[in-house]
Image (cartoon, rainbow, N blue to C red):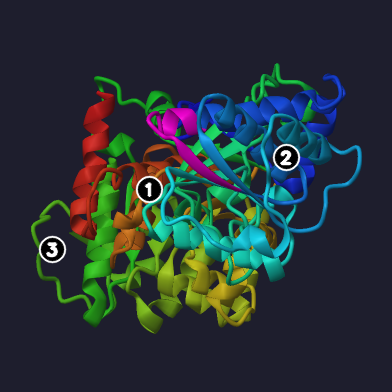
Amino acid sequence: MLPVLPLSRDVLLHDAASSRRVEAAALARHPAHGLIERAGWAVARLALALVPHGRTAIVFAGPGNNGGDGLIAARHLAARGWSVDIRLVGPAAKAGSDAAHALHAARHEGLHPQLGAAALADLPASTDLVLDALLGIGASRAPAGDIADAIRAIETMRMRGAPVLAVDVPSGLDARTGQALGDAVVRADHTLSLLTLKSGLFTGEGRALGGRLWFDDLGEATGDPGDDAPGEDRDGIARLIGRERILRWQRAFARSAASHKGRHGDVVVLGGAPSMRGAAWLAATAALTAGAGRVYAALPDDDGHPWPARPELMHWDVERWSAPALGWRDAVAVCGCGGGTAIAPALSTVLHGSARVVLDADALNLVAADEALQDALRRRAAQGHPTILTPHPLEAARLLGLQAAADIQADRLGAAVALAARFAATVVLKGSGSVIASPGQPLAINSTGSSALATAGSGDVLAGWTGGLWAQSPGADPHDLACAAVAWHGAAAEGHAGPLLAADLIEAMAALHAAAA
């Protein structure tokens, strides 16, 4: 058993369906009730480690195998001298099931679970641990009735200071999407994912609701995506990526002793309308700091004044987009950062001719509102010109013709895949657990980052950094490059208390260059 984060390598993520396939294969390798006994013991071991001086626990157990895991854990805690208060919630377990076995074994050891209305009455004033074993991965609709009441009881105990350990996923959280299924959802301090890692723990609301994440494969080696993994173990729906992606990129594109700026490519940032110059400045500075050889900014109504504190950045007359002989086609075009509608004419030219394009912010909104720009974007892939899109949820909704960011958040994985397919591009759907999707590539979810990134301009920094990496590595796979950029962006914010201003974020990202030296 290990904490999941930080990662040392990619790991596979599963939803309920793929988890059940892995579970079925594992069950075939074990005697009856053997696997659930392992799972319950794993929960108990983590509880003992998290609360080494604990003596009391309250276990909320549902009718399925998740509840069975909790009952077996309760049995082990009681055997070690804990006073365990078990509350059974929901209908009776099916006869002969693992859950029924767990209940019988608990009673055989002298435990007396409370049932019915009594299960949710007379909560103790305090306890050393609350165990959420209500629903697990099978939940597909909003909790209601006694289950919802039990979830609210868990929250009451948490607010009184008791730590909450959730089994597999916090009850009320969708195991695939990371969204709360309804108003009642457990907010855990720790979550132990068993046998497989669930994608919903790492995107949407999953990171906020799951607390610190732990994993136990129950001896089945299901978390390893390597080529030597058994077939059923490679049946995941996504890969969880982390800092290793930064190191992978740095090794692949390390600078030689003979390097000079001409070998590291050019970036042109198209954006920065008069009232939004800061966005273009942040993107251009990020591209320069990432290592691009030369960085220009193409600003509507450019006044030609020097860039604040960054004299290395150069100006680019917007009219140069209509002059291919000047060489702009080979530069990486980062479009949209603070550009408003003023960049629309130049954006059309870029989409039709630039070899590599990163679209962010206002460029995405212009594409969403213009079918001609959408057609130009789709044609780029057929011409061998890759594109990376970096939308936040509302921009993604506009691109898919949906009404609100909530429509995207309801299924972030599906939305990213749909965008990548619609525009034949690599998509970075930003947010907690950014999702990276490309046609024909394994879906990825980023594990780095924190709420420190929730500041104005952090998206401009990501777009510029992506362009800066791409300028240095024109032959890089856009999906791998996007994964590296997103992991880098998030890693720089980890460990920061409070908001991280975008200009300071660039400096923190630069420090990760030094860490690899």
Q: Which one is in front, 112 or 433?
A: 112
Question: Mark number for residue 307?
Answer: 3
State whether residue 134 appears in this view: yes
Q: Which residues are magenta?
A: 47-59
Q: Residues within 10 Å of mark 3 (few under 14, many from 20)?
A: some
Which residue is at 81% across, 34% downward? Answer: 101
For residue 53: magenta?
yes
Q: Mark 1 and mark 2 in contact (Cβ < 8 Å)? A: no
Q: Amino acid at mark 3?
A: Trp
Judged by depth in the image, the label closer to the viewer, 3 or 2, is 2
SS under mark 1: loop
Q: Which one is in front, 203 or 145?
A: 145
Q: Residues within 10 Å of mark 1 (few under 14, many from 20)?
A: many
Horizontal side of 66 relative to 403 (left or right) equals right
Q: Amino acid at mark 2?
A: Gly
Question: Mark number for residue 449?
Answer: 1
Which residue is at 66% across, 56% downward? Answer: 417
For residue 68: magenta?
no
Residue 13 x/y as whole percent? 63, 40
Snapshot quadrant of residue 53: top left
Residue 97 x/y as whole percent? 87, 39
Residue at the disc numbered 2:
68
Horizontal side of 473 relative to 305 (left or right) equals right
Point out the residue furthest to the top here.
228
